[in-house]
Image: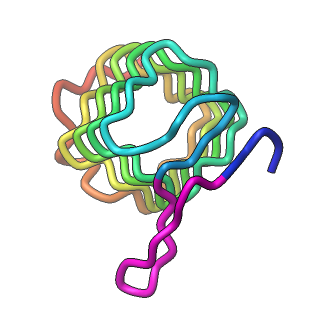
Amino acid sequence: MKNLSFLYLFLLSSTLRLVGLEVNGYVIEPGANLAGVNLSGADLSGANLSGANLSGANLSGALLKEADLSTADLKGANLSGANLTAANVDESIWVDVNLTGADLTNVWNLNKVRSANII
């Protein structure tokens, strides 16, 4: 994985979860302020981004398989071509989110997204 370092990992219910992950100089963790950052093509599979500010972020082509995006702010984010298979999006905010070509297979709590306005 290019430009990636693991700050720490922990096991939860025998599932490996990435916490405190650094990608392209940005720390990926719960509540992180990642507004407007470019994480296009990043492998964020299993990352805990609960409560993160991802407004205006470029996540096009990113791998977000099994990522925790619960309560995350995705206003204006670009998720075109992103893979969100089995991601948890409970109570996340999706206003003006670009999901063109995104894979939403088995996304958890898609019906509980707040303020959805998908473009």
- Seen in the picture, residue 17 relative to 67 is either above or below; the reply is below
Residue 37 at x, y percent in the picture = 55, 18
Q: Examine the structure image and report whether residue 15 is included in the region drawn in magenta.
A: yes
Write the residue at 69% across / 30% down: 24
Residue 118 at x, y percent in the picture = 36, 22
Residue 25 at x, y percent in the picture = 65, 29
Write the residue at 43% across / 16% down: 35
Q: Is residue 56 left or right of residue 90?
A: right
The image quadrant that residue 102 belongs to is top right
Frontmost residue, 91 versus 39 = 39
Q: Is residue 104 left or right of residue 49?
A: right
Which residue sits furthest bottom?
14
Q: Is residue 72 left or right of residue 20?
A: left
Viewport quadrant of the C terminus: top left
- Seen in the picture, residue 109 relative to 91 is either above or below; the reply is below
Frontmost residue, 65 versus 27 = 27
Q: Examine the structure image and report whether residue 31 is included in the region drawn in magenta.
A: no
Number of dots carrying numbers:
0
Which residue sits furthest right?
2
Q: Which residues are magenta?
A: 6-19
- Seen in the picture, residue 79 relative to 7 is either above or below; the reply is above
Residue 101 at x, y percent in the picture = 61, 34
Which residue sits furthest front?
7
The image quadrant that residue 40 belongs to is top right
Write the residue at 52% across / 36% down: 27
Write the residue at 57% across / 30% down: 26
Q: What kind of secondary structure does the magenta stretch mostly adopt?
A: strand
